[in-house]
Image: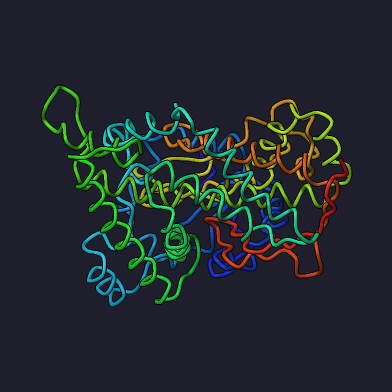
Amino acid sequence: MLNRKCPVAPQSAVELLSRPFARCPFPALRRLQEEGAVHQVETLPWYLVTQYDECLRILRNTEDFSSEFREFGESMRQVGLTPTPEVVAKMQAIGGERGSMFDVILHRDPPVHGHQRRLVNEALLTGRPGWEEMITETVSHLMEVFHAAGEIEFISAIAAPLPIAVISHILGIPEEMRQKVKQWADASTAATGRIASDDDWLRMSAAIAEQRGFFASELRKRIDSPADDLISLFAQDVRRQGQDGQQALTFDEAVEILVLLLVAGNETTTQLMGAAALYLATEKGLLERLRGDAALISTFVEETLRLTAPIQTMMRFVINDTEIAGVAIPKGSLVSVCFNQASRDRAKFGDDTDSLNLDRSNLRHHLAFSSGIHTCPGARLARLETRILLEHLVKTVGRMWISGDDAVEYNMASLGVRGMTRLSLQYERLSR
């Protein structure tokens, strides 16, 4: 029998969608988690789910919990997650009918989701020859900054340019455009997971429109003159439209997926790298332990993912009257799956879930990359980049610590991406 009284979170929607809350959401979400699996936000059609088992069940249940953004505009409007009609009209004038929405993979259900994800899986899950060598060379080049004075702003020097260089190389974007890629990424996520300003929405729309224009042009070139990159892989799939029994991507689908890959392929990895470096600077003895046992570096990456999921929450949309942990959830509601807190659930990971523990037996069960059909296809690449970076760091740096009271800033924080933008570190190079 369903308990139709859902506990209500003490936070308002405005607070939950604010940057101050997103910078450190864990204490508040811990209190919700200990009280129950699901909480309603005010009287809104919005529910937060924080316990691991229920989050996992939702992620794997596409029959009741949908990823299709188009169907749930009214609920999102009530929560405060949509622009005004006037701004929507301006966004459409900038970016066309879709405005700023990624109308592919991430926001699609089966069967369209599977058709679109096929090529992404081929591109990212299997990888390509030379990727590891390319990443290693890029890391070596960026790490040259550690030969200078003993202070570094890690995000701008390492954690942001590395994923941008890697995803740009893989896609086939010229090196001279990497600063533009960073600008596109920042603007494209400006309104995600928070109450955004009109300017944020318009910047997002303009950035995504520019990216669509760029990838449309590059796809057309590579349909007839392919190269060894992912744009060419997608172009050749588009080219064979109708030529064999398999369903190929349309031109518009390919453009949209490439835009999504570019945005998703750098910011989340930047956050993973920043979080790992922060732990290296603040956890006593961690650098020495990793230096003594390099096999633990991959374990450290997983524990960092568990503690600081780069994507903090992801929404699902209720398409049938259903229930979560015995609580009735009506059709048309929004459900936020809290990856960040689910991966700190003591019922799943033990009593010390707020602490770094490299001896945790089940740490790879975290939800940092989601689960089910929407498991992040770029997870392998993010892990590879971060592992290679950490291998270089532990061989280069003898000691590292944060530099000053304002060393760590989260000026892009939201319920979507935590958004570390500054990590000032001091260090001593390892004596040879």
Where residue 61 appears, as percent x and y from the top left, is 43, 33
Vertical comparison of 401 with 111: above or below: below
Query: Residue 388 falls in which quadrant of the image?
Result: top right
Which image quarter is the C terminus in? top right
The residue sitting at the left extreme is 242
Figure colour scheme: rainbow
Vertical comparison of 36 with 178: above or below: above
Question: Residue at horizontal 26%, vertical 36%?
Answer: 112
Q: Is residue 130 left or right of residue 206?
A: right
Where residue 85 appears, as percent x and y from the top left, is 28, 73
Where residue 281 appears, as percent x and y from the top left, is 80, 52
Vertical comparison of 375 with 161: above or below: above
Q: Is residue 203 left or right of residue 145?
A: left
- In the depicted view, which residue is nearer to us: 114 or 174? 174
The residue sitting at the top extreme is 245
Question: Residue at horizontal 61%, vertical 53%?
Answer: 159
- In the depicted view, which residue is nearer to us: 333 or 67? 67
Q: How many marks?
A: 0
- In the depicted view, which residue is nearer to us: 222 or 334? 222
Q: Is residue 368 left or right of residue 295?
A: left
- In the depicted view, which residue is nearer to us: 313 or 238? 238
Where residue 218 appears, as percent x and y from the top left, is 26, 50
Q: Is residue 338 left or right of residue 109?
A: right
